[in-house]
Amino acid sequence: MKTLRAYLSTLLIAALVITSLPVAAAPAAPQSMDLVSTQSVLSADRAGADRERINEILARADVQDQLVKQGVDLDEVEARVAALSDAEAQQMAEQLEQLPAGAGVVGALFAVFIILLVTDILGLTDVYPFTR
């Protein structure tokens, strides 16, 4: 019985050592210990809210009708809104908020047109052929 116990304990120790080697040898994943400032969290939250506001306005049927009449692809508009930087999204949302009630459609279309025009002139997009 003592020999069986000695044999089993040796076998158990060897099995535990062999199974723990991959865990001990694996490199530890680097964990970011950076602190997150309140300002960075608030700015990220505001940027998301600005993009939501822009998307809400662009989702309206009358705005989409006007964009189609202008010859703008709706998928292209969505892609460009997603590609806006946080500062650009904030500026566009502020412009949309300053528009008077009832005139928001024209102003929103004008803002989208200007943004599309500027990105087309910079060569980032290819929407308007007259910018070549």
Image: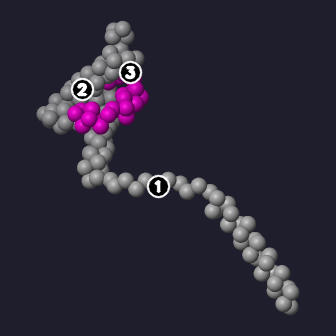
Q: Amino acid at mark 1?
A: Gln
Residue 56, quarter of picture = top left
Q: Amino acid at mark 3?
A: Leu
Sequence-first disc among 1 and 3: 1
| Rendered residue at 81%/84% (across/down) | 6
Compared to residue 124, the image places residue 104 above or below, namely: below
What residue is shown with label 2?
111
x and y, in percent, of residue 45 in the image: 29, 48
What residue is shown with label 3?
124
What residue is shown with label 1?
31
Q: Is residue 9 left or right of residue 97?
A: right
Foreground of the two, 89 or 99: 89
Q: Is residue 113 visible?
A: no
| Rendered residue at 16%/30% (across/down) | 103
| Rendered residue at 80%/76% (across/down) | 11
x and y, in percent, of residue 66 in the image: 29, 24
Query: Neighbour class for label 2 at 10 Å: few (<14), some, many (≥20)?
Result: some
| Residues drawn in magenta | 67-92
Q: Is residue 25 visible?
A: yes
Q: Secondary structure at mark 3?
A: loop
